[in-house]
Image (cartoon, helix red, strand yellow):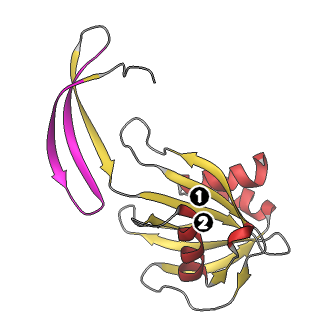
Amino acid sequence: MKKPLWEILNSKPVFDGKWISMRVDDIKLPDGTQIQFEGVHYHFEGAGVCAKDEQGKIVLVQNYRYLTDLYSWEIPAGVVDKGFEPDDIIIKELKEEAGCEVRKGNIKKLGIVHPSIGSSNQLLHCFSATNVKQVSDELDTNEITNRGWFTKEEIAKMIKNGEIKDQFSISVLLWDLFLV
């Protein structure tokens, strides 16, 4: 393993919450310059899925995100709870958010992404799932405002016209639908 280029001289906690913590680090750069750097540290990893039914349609859920005051179509996703594997979370989130079921054997890991690699340690697991079946019309009304099934072409249009705004969703959808 390579030696880190940035040397942490001192680290000061600024905030410590349930989901994230923040700290300010005094850093020595390779040229000897010293800077202060602020970082967000996530306490949990995340997992999300491009979930397709037998016809190849993709299920998305619509969320209202109060921090940005926006509605966005997104992939089913959630926090990887301690003691669980990321693919277990995919099964759980598909059921809770979209009313869908999938067998573990129909889930494939695409890889991981670091959405804010320069300012946080956030790590998100990306999955693809096939033969997903909708088994319920119920939605988590505290989180989900709508659910829909879309073709690959509709997804491309939704990304282009800004209906899908979430970077994690866009990454997983593009990875699964256009790169695999």
In the displayed structure image, the side of residue 175 where residue 45 appears, left or right: left
Asked which quadrant contains residue 68, the reply is: bottom left
The magenta span reads 8-29
Indicate the secondary structure of the residue bearing disc 1.
Answer: helix
Q: Is residue 24 above or below residue 34?
A: below
Residue at image mark 2: 75
Question: Which numbered disc, 2 or 1, marks the residue that appears first in the sequence?
Answer: 2
Where is residue 20 shown, x and y percent of the image?
28, 55
Q: Is residue 21 above or below residue 150?
A: above
Instruction: Identify which residue is drawn at 54% across, 87% down.
Output: 139
Q: How many marks?
A: 2
Query: Which residue occupies the foreground of this view, 114 or 148?
Result: 114
Residue at image mark 1: 169
Indicate the secondary structure of the residue bearing disc 2.
Answer: loop
Q: Is residue 14 above or below residue 26?
A: below
Kind of residue sitting beneath label 2: Ile
Kind of residue sitting beneath label 1: Ser
Report if the CB atoms under discs 2 and 1 are less than 8 Å apart: yes
Where is residue 144 shown, x and y percent of the image?
50, 79
What secondary structure do most residues of the magenta stretch adopt? strand
Asked which quadrant contains residue 87, the reply is: bottom right
Residue 26 visible from this viewpoint: yes
